[in-house]
Amino acid sequence: MDSNVDEKQQSNSPIQSDSLTIQYSTSDLDSPISSDEDSINLEMINVKSKGEAFCDCHKKGKEKECTCGEEDTCFEWTWDEESKSHASFIKEGDREVMFHIDYSGGTAAVRGNTKLHKDQYYWEIKMTTPVYGTDMMVGVCTTDIDLNKCRHVFCSMIGQDSDSWGLSYTGHLQHKKNKQSYSSKFGQGSIVGVHLDMWHGTLSFYKNRKPLGIAYTGLQGKILYPVVSSTAARSGMKIIRCCSFPTSLQFMCCQVLRKVIPSHLDVLTAVELPPGLKDFLKNNVQWLLQPFPSSAAGPLKSSKRTHSEEDADGAGPSKRIKYKLLKEDK
């Protein structure tokens, strides 16, 4: 869809993509939802996403009190009150953002308050509300992006230019308006993880803590910020994890271990480590070392992948393997 065309003028037209056809109406996107309702009637929203959730809370009607996956209590950054569009409202310790709290008239966005430029960065965004509409996106951007430029336009905002790199809830990547199929879609309750490796200049995504592979390359030397955007009325996203780790021999050893140890095994249990080192790695890079089932994406690669790539789980022995982890010289 042309990003310069208001959705109100195309209320009966489907959005076509490689893996999804969305039929929407103006009432889905622009009409306010009664505050008396305890929840949004998903059957009335034809554009709702049925993407896989991290837990079953929203299916049981417990989405409001859901804290699944929210184990972390310390956060290195939050959303920036000074770097957001007019229709973005930050709450809960500046970690949760709500978009278009009355009705949606375009696209809103918000940026993180910490620059990312030299280390390994990982953060997770939880979709706390129904996911629907033209687009809801997660990604990174530079300070050159204008977060208010699409406030009157329904569009896939992150990745429309050369200053942002995004992942849509439909599973498409976007940069410089070029879209590429990458993963299956996500919906309410999904946890989207983002790994920014500024040493290699790569950006990778996780879905419900399962790696999806490298999405973007060539980011070395840039100063980037986390960013999210949405066109959907009363949509919300929440930071549930954000941490950084120096690029070091220790971190690279962890990356190698994750590649060579069968994906269904937890590296921290498969490898015999001193208790102190094990606790340190658990507190800092557990997101990298955790297991994921064979149905998830294969091992991380140095090139882009799409959701249609064949899973490469590896054929290593499943028995307990002993490895020696090199300690970084200080």
Image (cartoon, grey):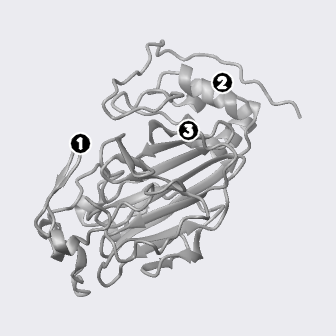
Could you say where residue 155 lies in the image, as x and y percent from the top left?
33, 64
For marks 1 and 3, the one nearer the N-term is: 1
Report which residue position mark 2 lands on.
272
Residue under the point 61% across and 30% down: 255
For marks 2 and 1, the one nearer the N-term is: 1
Say what amino acid the circle numbered 3 marks: Thr
Report which residue position mark 1 lands on.
18
Q: Which one is closest to the eye, mark 3 or mark 2?
A: 3
Could you say where residue 19 lies in the image, as x and y percent from the top left?
22, 43
Location of residue 118 with respect to 239 vertically, above or below: above
Q: Would you say 185 lies left or right of 9 here?
A: right
Residue 271 position by quadrant: top right
Task: Name the foreground residue: 304 vs 97.
Answer: 304
Q: Which one is closest to the eye, mark 2 or mark 1?
A: 1
**Label 1: which secondary element:** loop
Report which residue position mark 3 lands on.
217
Residue under the point 75% across and 30% down: 249
